[in-house]
């Protein structure tokens, strides 16, 4: 019977090869450049790239805003309590 040991085996295996995929691909593209493709980006592809760029930028800005609000709340809790205690004389 299957007892789950296979899942533990595959999840604990080192996956060092994942770190090397992107650098090897970039070096390979630089060392072995392709000839001119004589291609173009049509309107639909350009629109998709523009939408992805704008969406990624707005997502990053929203994430930064949420982290900033959390940081302000945390600092308010940490430093606000000390300020209230000093004012009340405790």
Image (cartoon, helix red, strand yellow):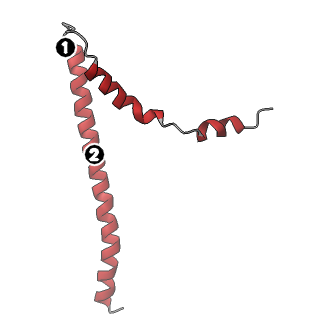
Question: 71 or 26, which lies in front?
Answer: 26
Q: Residues within 10 Å of mark 1 (few under 14, many from 20)?
A: few
Residue 39: image quadrant is top left
Which residue lies most toward the front here? 31
Residue at 59%, 39% in the rendered image: 11
Pointer 2: what residue?
A: 62
Query: In terms of sequence position, does the residue under pointer 1 or pointer 2 come before the other?
Result: 1
The answer to which image quadrant residue 2 occupies is top right
Residue 65, horizontal then vertical, whole percent:
26, 51
Using the image, determine if residue 26 lies above or below residue 68: above
Q: Nearer the viewer, residue 44 or 84?
A: 44
Q: Picture coordinates of residue 78 (x, y %)?
A: 34, 73
The residue under label 1 is: 43
Spatial separation of the CA atoms under disc 1 and disc 2: 28 Å
Which disc, if any, is residue 77? none
Residue situated furthest right in the rendering:
1
Circle 2 Cα neighbour tier, 10 Å, few/some/many (<14 / 14–19 / ≥20): few
């Amino acid at each position: 019977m299957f007892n789950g040991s296979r899942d533990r085996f595959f999840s604990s295996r080192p996956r060092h090869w994942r770190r090397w995929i992107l650098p090897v691909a970039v070096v390979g593209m630089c060392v072995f450049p392709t000839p001119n493709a004589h291609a173009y980006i049509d309107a639909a592809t350009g629109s998709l790239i523009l939408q992805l760029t704008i969406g990624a930028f707005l997502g990053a800005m929203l994430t930064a805003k949420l982290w900033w609000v959390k940081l302000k709340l945390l600092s308010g809790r940490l430093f606000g309590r000390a300020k209230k205690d000093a004012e009340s004389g405790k």
